[in-house]
Amino acid sequence: MERTNRAHRWAGRTDRELLAELARDEVGALGELFERHHDRVRALCYRLTGDPQVADDLLQESFLRILRYGSGFKGQAAFTTWLYRLVRNVCIDHMRSEDRIRAGNESWASDQALDVMPDTSDPRLDRLRTALYRLAPEKREVLVLSRYEGMSYAEIAEVCETTVGAIKVRAHRAMRELRARFEELGQTT
């Protein structure tokens, strides 16, 4: 019953209000934010890294950073934009610390469980999944955010702290490279 009362306490509050409560050391607000956003955050971590265990770790790290830095949210952007930026930074920090970028995406992609898309017996989807993970992280990121998360180029630009034009160029180049890698993989099978 106490859990229901606590959960009810936060029901109806906006994400911004929950962050304000969190800044006042109301840690229960973090629980509500977690309940609302953990599926989305984990999915984003998974799609950016391609590793389910790493995604779980990065999910936890993301919510620890919300706890640590939530008071820094100024409300100039939508909460979800701020959240995506925070999660993106957590993923980038992880990839850098593991030297994944320098080690090369080709070998990294072949070692990962590439389950961004549902399992099927369709070899074309398997090729597409592999091709996606062979893209450089910044190219894969723009495709994940636009195609899987449904974000507009303006929202992605805000998350990535760049211009809409730069995101459009990155998306165009990423799609072109994805097509080329998809075709390459078709020729090798």
Image (cartoon, rainbow, N blue to C red):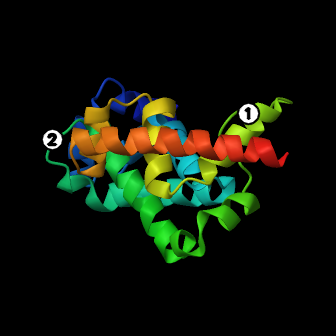
Q: Residue drawn 78% across and 44% down? A: 187
Tag 1 secondary structure: helix
Could one spot residue 155 in this view of the protein?
yes
Say which of 180 and 81 sits in front: 180
**Labelled pair 1, 2 in contact (Cβ < 8 Å):** no
Kind of residue indicated by mark 1: Leu
Which residue does the numbered mark 1 point to in the structure image? 125
Q: Residue drawn 23% across and 39% down? A: 164
Above or below 55: residue 14: above
> Could you tell me residue 11's position as x and y percent?
36, 26
Badge 1 crowding class, 10 Å Cα cut-off, few under 14, some 14 to 19, many 20 or more, is: some
Q: Residue drawn 51% across and 67% down? A: 95
- Determine the CA span between mark 1 and mark 2: 40 Å
Kind of residue indicated by mark 2: Gly
Tag 2 secondary structure: loop
Could one spot residue 115 in this view of the protein?
no
Which residue does the numbered mark 2 point to in the structure image? 75
> Could you tell me residue 154's position as x and y percent?
25, 34
Quarter that holds the C terminus:
top right
Q: Is residue 6 left or right of residue 77?
A: right
